[in-house]
Amino acid sequence: MNVTTTTQPPLQSGADTIAVGVFEDEGIAHDVDGGALEALLDRGEARRSFGHLAVSHAGGGRFILVGLGERSAFDAERARRAAATVLGRARELGTQTLCWEVPHHVDDDVAGALVEGTLLANYRFTLFKGGDDDTSARGPGALVLSAHDDLAPAAARAAALAGAQNAARDLQNRPANDLTPTALADEARRLAGAIAGLEVEVLGRAEIEARGMGAFAAVFRGSDQEPALIVLRYAHPEPRGPVLGMVGKAVTFDSGGLTIKTGPGMVEMKFDMSGGAAVLEAAALVARRELPVRLVAVIGATDNVISGRSIKPGDIVSAADGTTIEINNTDAEGRLVLADCILHARELGAERLVDLATLTGGVVTALGSVYAGVMSNDDAWCAAVTAAGDAAGEPVWRLPLHPRYAEAIEGVYADITNTGRDRKAHPLMGAEFLHRFAGDVPWAHLDIAGVANDNGLPYTGKGGAGWGVRLLVTLTESLAAGPS
């Protein structure tokens, strides 16, 4: 969808459909035909309650009136939701160009959120579906923001964020027989070839094993698919802030290994690469926008399947730093991949670390699909990650680390185990496992299992949500704004 802005009135935008939001206790700012839109409100056909829609033809144009509720409660997240609601009706109407009359006295974040909500809601994954000649089913091809002020920078940023998020959704939604670790590595190579300043390196099975990454290697041992350690680097000529390390879990399919999942628990395990997808697309956007930072992104890509070579419960493996790990559960594989990836990011000079992973079902039980869990060894860094999530509309909730959680993964036959001795506090056990490999580098672990897909938001719908792209880019922007 092409996104533009104008300071001209909506009826002069060339759009065939115009969206107008109405707050409680407020009228129509720019009415037409002597009050035709206000008359809809007076008759009760249109309402100011949040999300209510009404359609009218007036002044030579087609209007969608949408209730925005109380102005004091209207923020960027409500703007995304309102935009998704409007987009749904616009699609039904066969809209080709949609113009949003941006409400008066809202900030650039809200204006940008109207763009994000529209583009995210307009997303469709049709790679494996037959052709559709119904143009209305494809949604509008253009979006215009009409406002008194110049919103071009805010709209461009929002369109770029939504575009990167939708690209991550494309990766998530591809089935595991199509999006193999090799295919994900190929996408990283494609992005690096298209974006100036973005460098990529991909290591395969033999190279990973030669580097002593036995934790990562334990996961891909049972697979015929070639694994990939994907490393993306970007450095602005005049960078600011510390070197940021992004680490993503990209298990392209997770059967659970010999600790096999049940059928219902396995059917959507193609989404176990969601953290890697977010890291890949966020890193690409950081480079594309030429943000003044230094970035290293490490993505561990493999599947976790069963063969005669598969790792077994009770086996002991060694991570790249020599830490020995007793495998109590082959379905706790993501932390094994991430352990070596975190160590590699540190080796490449990362001075701040953030990892994204669909790590545990326990975080879904605790937080549902509203928050991702964040666990960190550094209060200031955790606060920065939390602030980025709030600003981006991808909120996180901090869960605690504690020496007793760390003690619970101490091994009997090895240094540590990959799960605790019981089913208590799974997200925290996983975090303490990763904490050991992050060391004293400020680090934040985001367990995104509840938000990565089917997260209930009206603008992401069913399937991959691309969660984390906006947070990571916003976090990078905060580093870029800091001291050099």
Image (spheres, helix red, strand yellow):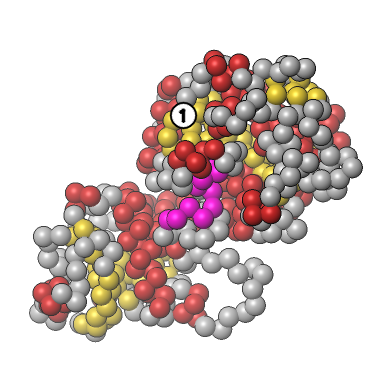
Residue 353 visible in the snapshot: no
Residue shown at 43% from the left, 59% from the top: 459
Residue shown at 64% from the left, 21% from the top: 409
Quarter of image, res 456: bottom left
Residue shown at 78% from the left, 32% from the top: 313
106 left or right of 305 in image = left
Residue 452 drawn in magenta: yes
Foreground pick, 378 / 422: 422
Count neighbours of disc 1 (C-alpha within 10 A) and say few if under 14, some if 14 to 19, many if 20 or more. some
Task: Indicate whether 5 appears above or below 304.
Answer: below
Foreground pick, 230 / 145: 230
Q: Which residue is mark 1?
A: 399
Task: Indicate whether 446 appears above or below 319.
Answer: below
236 left or right of 193 in image = left
480 left or right of 148 in image = right
Residue 163 drawn in magenta: no
Q: In the current view of this chain or complex, which residue is farthest to the right?
A: 308
Rendering coords of residue 274 (x, y %)? 60, 47
Residue shown at 42% from the left, 45% from the top: 370
Rendering coords of residue 234 (x, y %)? 60, 37
Task: Indicate whether 215 appears above or below 163.
Answer: above
Secondary element at image label 1 = loop
Quarter of image, res 379: top left
Quarter of image, res 307: top right
Rendering coords of residue 479 (x, y %)? 45, 31
Residue 308 visible in the snapshot: yes
127 left or right of 310 in image = left
Foreground pick, 241 / 352: 352
Foreground pick, 1 / 323: 323
Region in magenta = 448-457
Rendering coords of residue 213 (x, y %)? 78, 28
Q: Amino acid at mark 1?
A: Leu
